[in-house]
Image: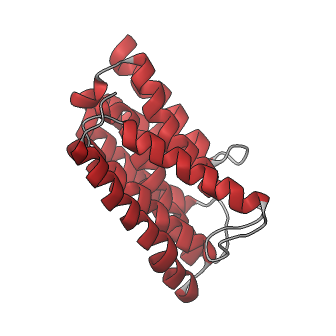
Amino acid sequence: MLLTIGDVEWGIALTIWVAFVTLYISKLISKITTTYVARKVMHILGGGVVAILAPFVFTSPLVPIIASYVLMAYLIFNRAKKNYLNWFQDEGNRGEVYYTFSFGTLLLIMEFLDHGYWLTKDVFIPLLPIYYMSFGDGVTGIIRNYVYKRRVKGLWGSVGMAIVCVPLGYYFFSIYGAISGVIATLVEIAPFLDDNIGVPFISFAFLYLAIKVL
């Protein structure tokens, strides 16, 4: 994986953006709404925006991978010290740690499976599941917060996720992409697996097998 001056510059710029979302925007959202909504907004405006820009501004996945793991380490360290950023961190929910882990790990796995994928359309095989995790699950959480007034799996949240994920999947990979959007929606409903692990990894596994193996 290559690293250029442009990669470093964009890495710094997007790190500043994510810090701004994390330390200012999400805190403001938390005061207006809830900690849960603040975390979902972070997924959309932080990780989601980075995931959209990444294939156009970086020459390889190296910077996003490193940045995601550094952020994960920082979040784990805060938890270990019980120094919670309480406007989005919840002692009983490690979603933000799983999110950062999934972000970097999907890109890394794809690099091992298909070196050079970053410069082809295959870059969206790992990125599309990250979009599901960021935008689909983010919208789902916000809908459920306002419809049910509590964190609970419910029909309208799943409808919202399907509306985001299925067309998004179809746009990138036609019928296989649409099916992956349905899979992501079904996985999100499952109560036994954290959305930030299940949604990206299972939809990624399907996409990779359907597009690169079958």
Q: Position of residue 214 (x, y in %)?
A: 38, 11
Furthest residue in direction bottom, as rendered: 32
Compared across the picture, whether 170 is left or right of 207 comes to left
Q: Quadrant of residue 128?
A: top left
The residue sitting at 67% across, 64% down in the picture is 152
Q: Quadrant of residue 192?
A: top right
Which residue is at 78% across, 63% downward? Answer: 81
Residue 184 visible in the current orientation: no
For the residue pair 86 and 34, the one nearer the viewer reads as 86
Return the residue found at the far front: 5
Q: Residue at x 28, y 53 (%)?
A: 10
Q: Position of residue 151 (x, y in %)?
A: 67, 67
Q: Position of residue 190 (x, y in %)?
A: 66, 45
Q: Residue 116, located in which quarter of the rendered image? A: top left
Q: Residue drawn 54% across and 64% down?
A: 141
In this rendering, would 82 be left or right of 104?
A: right
- Residue placed most toward the observer, 53 or 145: 53
Of the 4 image quadrants, the one containing the N terminus is: top left
- Position of residue 71 relative to residue 109, above or below, is below
Q: Position of residue 166 (x, y in %)?
A: 36, 45
